[in-house]
Image (tube, rainbow, N blue to C red):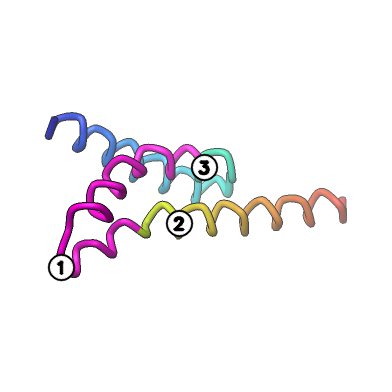
Amino acid sequence: MLLLWNLAFCVSIFTLIMGLVKQSWRLLLISSIPTLPIALYFLMGAENAFKYVGFSPLLLLILTAAMWVMNKRKMKFN
């Protein structure tokens, strides 16, 4: 189980970095998907400040939407 969490975390971090470097909203969306199981675990089970880790996919989805809007505006002006 821990191996799957570490793998999901590594995939998420790697695609987040690549998405920010390449300014790709698709990679940022892919980055938010592996964090969902980990986030749900912390939202449902944590009784302390670790439950706020559960909001990380929400932040990634907001970043994805912002990048998508920026790409749409760039395409409109070209």
Closest to the observer, 29 or 27: 29
Whether tag 1 and tag 3 are in contact, CB under 8 A, the answer is no
Residue for badge 2: 58
User: In the rendered structure, which segment of residues is drawn in magenta?
Assistant: 29-54
**Image quarter of residue 32:** top left
From the viewer's perspective, is 28 left or right of 57?
A: right
First along the sequence among labels 1 and 3: 3
Q: CA distance from mark 1 to mark 2?
A: 19 Å
Residue 22 sits inside the magenta stretch: no
Whether tag 3 and tag 2 are in contact, CB under 8 A, the answer is no
Residue for badge 3: 29
Residue under the point 12% across and 34% down:
2
Q: Picture coordinates of residue 65 (x, y %)?
A: 61, 54
First along the sequence among labels 3 and 2: 3
From the viewer's perspective, is 37 left or right of 20?
A: left
From the viewer's perspective, is 49 left or right of 70?
A: left
